[in-house]
Amino acid sequence: MFDAVLRRAYAPATDGMARILNRHSVRAGQATAAGFVLGLGAAGSAANGWWWPALGLWLASRVVDGLDGAIARLEGPTRRGGFLDLMADFTVYAAFVAGVAVQVPSARLAAVALLCTYYVSGAAFLAWSAAAAESQPSPAGEGGLAVADNRSLRFVGGLAEGAETVAVYCLVCLLPHHATVILWAFAGLVAVTAVQRIVFAAADLRPPGGRRSPV
């Protein structure tokens, strides 16, 4: 929900750091890999109940994740880079939830529910992105859900996005005894996001003139 606003706010800092890293021959793919490893470290720490290390590693992974896109813009974004970045993010998001479930048995059902909502929301986003890539740019503007922000893949926004995920996982690390309630609440937000994306995609992909699709 706040991703676009936050991205504009911290763009000067990330762009400056990206230029420094780029001058030292750090590539976007290397930043993606580093963020991925740090994220898995956060998940492993959560699984062992090392909540402060989990918090530090999680925040570090998200900082690095923000840098890989800025470096990619200097190099020239590629679909391959966008694909690998997205896969790394999805894997880390799921791994952290699994780590919490290992350490907090009472949160396991909530973790399953959250992973299911991730699945539906991600499927809606990816299916629309693939279909939209074959057509003209979406007309959705300021009030719409479609996001065009120089990334290599087209995104559909919603109530729960990257910023909310970062905040919720930090909250779990700080309040692990309330992990069950936190995960259930976030699963609800992600479910709303999934519905938003499905409704948007269904409207955006409607045949011109309201004709029924043959599929």
Image (cartoon, rainbow, N blue to C red):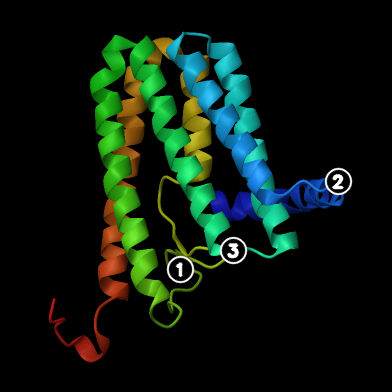
Other residues around mark 3 within 10 Å, as few (<14) / some (14–19) / many (≥20): few
Q: For the point 43% across and 83% down, which residue is it?
A: 136
Q: Nearer the viewer, residue 108 or 130?
A: 130
Judged left or right of residue 154, residue 198 is left
Q: Is mark 3 on a helix, strand or loop?
A: loop
Residue bearing mark 1: 143
Marks 3 and 2 sit apart, C-alpha to C-alpha, by: 21 Å
Q: Where is residue 166 in the image (x, y as percent from the top left)?
A: 52, 34
Label placed on residue 78: 3
Among numbered discs 1 and 3, the one appearing first in the sequence: 3
Judged left or right of residue 211, residue 186 is right
Marks 1 and 3 sit apart, C-alpha to C-alpha, by: 28 Å
Q: What element carries label 1?
A: loop
Residue bearing mark 2: 24
Other residues around mark 1 within 10 Å, as few (<14) / some (14–19) / many (≥20): few
CB contact under 8 Å: marks 3 and 2:
no
Q: Which of 185 and 98 is in front in this view?
A: 98
Q: For the point 26% across and 54% down, which residue is it?
A: 195
Q: Nearer the viewer, residue 184 or 30?
A: 30
Indicate the amino acid at tag 3: Thr
Among numbered discs 3 and 2, the one appearing first in the sequence: 2
Q: Where is residue 145 in the image (x, y as percent from the top left)?
A: 42, 63
